[in-house]
Amino acid sequence: MAHAYRAGAGGVVTKSIGPKPREGYPNPTVEQLGSWGMLNAMGLPNPGMEEYPKEIQEALGAGAVVVGSLFGGDTEEFASLARRMEATGVHALELNLSCPHAKGYGSEIGQDPVELAQVVRAVKSATHVPVWAKITPNTHDPALLAEAAEKAGADAITAINTVRAMAIDPVLRRPVLANELGGLSGPAIKPIGLAAVWKIFERVRIPIVGVGGISSGRDAFEYLLAGARALEVGTAVATRGIQVFREVHEELAGYLEKAHFRSVAEAVGAAHRR
Amino acid sequence: MRTIVRIDEKHWETPSTVTLRFRYPPAARPGQFVMLWLPGDDEIPMSLSYPSDELKGVTVKAMGDTSRRLLDLEPGIQVGIRGPYGNSFDLSPRRLLVIAGGSGGATLAPAAESLRQKGGSVTVALGATTAKELLFRERFSALADGGLEIATDDGTMGHRGYVTDVAARLLSERTFDALWTCGPEVMMVKLTRLAEKSRVPIYCSVEREMKCAISMCDACAFGPFHVCSDGPVFEGSALHKIPDFGAFKRDPSGRRVRA
């Protein structure tokens, strides 16, 4: 995390942390799909909330803005994890309500607006730092989930998580990922993320953190125009290296300048005001 | 993308080590590794013991469950390969000392062969628990123009004791431009200290838990580095700054545990 921050990221989002150490799924956990996408079913491996604060301290010590991502099996677990995560000194919490491939976690809670709202409400009343609800695209209407999160008190919406997907090997005639199903990320999902951010922007007032297939300044600019106010980059670290943060920043500055936007804020949602 | 390849050949190198050869065209440099998928089982990182040949190869020692099952594979079985990944050995040293412990020879032997082809001179110190477990003894003997020295824990061949004793003696007797090593991490830690004392640069091939192999998942986090893409070959001066070297590794959950 400290490394990414020093490489030019404005802030870092942690791995999603749960209550106990979790090994995740066996390999293969990742399938690279040419230049257009990546498929993963890591299975939320994490060292657990007991151990992880050490790493957060390191990142905070390096001066990074840290967003603590967490996942739980139910409302109480989310709330108690949120309390412990807040105590580490993170600047905000991101609730992973959207992992598409871990049974009993993520999507299974996050696809239901009622359950999602309960989690957000519980976390909000247990903590004081801003709470971001990361929502899934694997639903007929992501904006409905965003509305539920906003009503429950969320301070921001993160959209989107990976898109449920799989790969089958034609020679062996079997699924590639050990977990069979996984989540698609990378350039292939940028249009899906843009559409989600677009619809969410129309229906909620809280800020949107755009994520999904951002690997260049142009992608970042498009997300701002759709309505995102902050951006997350993940998969592009594998394709462009850790310098991707600085590069996207610089490229984005070029787009903003060419369009005569004096700040990021001016570009947010600009495509809605034609 | 994975490529499904057929295992064309299998050779027993020692009673606990086999080499599997397969056709996999992508170019690779000595020191790099591939991810080898045993369908229905697991996918593990394997150094290429034959990175430049038409028939590429990996050399597997029975360590975990999956490597044990790889030993039982018969030619004709299909496995998945992706890669190669990681950095490689720098082939510029003129007078090189290679110290191979246990299965470390799998990555060092082809690298040393490449250096010889470029005109460098190579001396090898090879260590194992016992004579029968000396990996690539003949291969090293054929390439080591500066001589092959052997150490076994039980004294069944060469020096009785650690290969680091042999390395210390060689460093005191002769001049080298660089050291390459791969094997148990305690051995590599000792060697980095020896190299520092002798003021010779040392390059260590490091192993860690591996999942994505493309610098995404953080499973192979090693100080500020990812072993999969910043390594697996690290220079001694970088290793000195990594508290994990010789002390900690990460388990599959990402927890730091004693190595």
Image (cartoon, grey):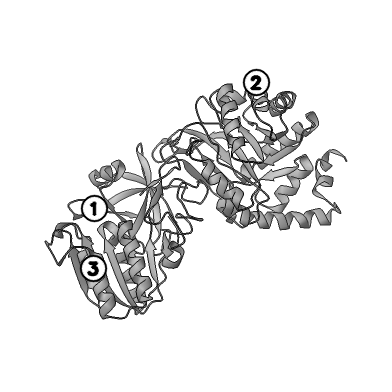
**What is the CA distance from the residue labelled 1 to the residue labelled 3?**
28 Å
Nearest to the eye among marks 1 and 3: give it. Answer: 3
Residue A11: % across, % down? 66, 48
Task: Characterize the local packing of mark 2: few (<14), some (14-19) or many (20 or more) Cα atoms within 10 angstroms.
Answer: some
Residue B232: % across, % down? 42, 59
Nearest to the eye among marks 1 and 2: give it. Answer: 2
- Classify residue B74 as left or right of residue A257: left
**Amino acid type, residue under disc 1 in the picture:** Val
Q: Label 2 lies in what chain?
A: A
Task: Characterize the local packing of mark 3: few (<14), some (14-19) or many (20 or more) Cα atoms within 10 angstroms.
Answer: some
Task: Characterize the local packing of mark 1: few (<14), some (14-19) or many (20 or more) Cα atoms within 10 angstroms.
Answer: many
Whether residue A98 is situated above or below residue B116 in the rendered picture = above
Q: Are marks 1 and 3 in contact (CB under 8 Å)?
A: no
**What is the CA distance from the residue labelled 3 to the residue labelled 2?**
64 Å
- Classify residue B184 as left or right of residue A98: left
Residue A246: % across, % down? 67, 57
Mark 1 or mark 3, earlier in chain: 1
Q: How many marks?
A: 3
* Residue A143 visible, this orientation: yes
**What is the CA distance from the residue labelled 1 to the residue labelled 2?**
56 Å
Residue topped by disc 3: B165
Q: Classify residue B153 by image quadrant.
A: bottom left
Residue topped by disc 2: A118
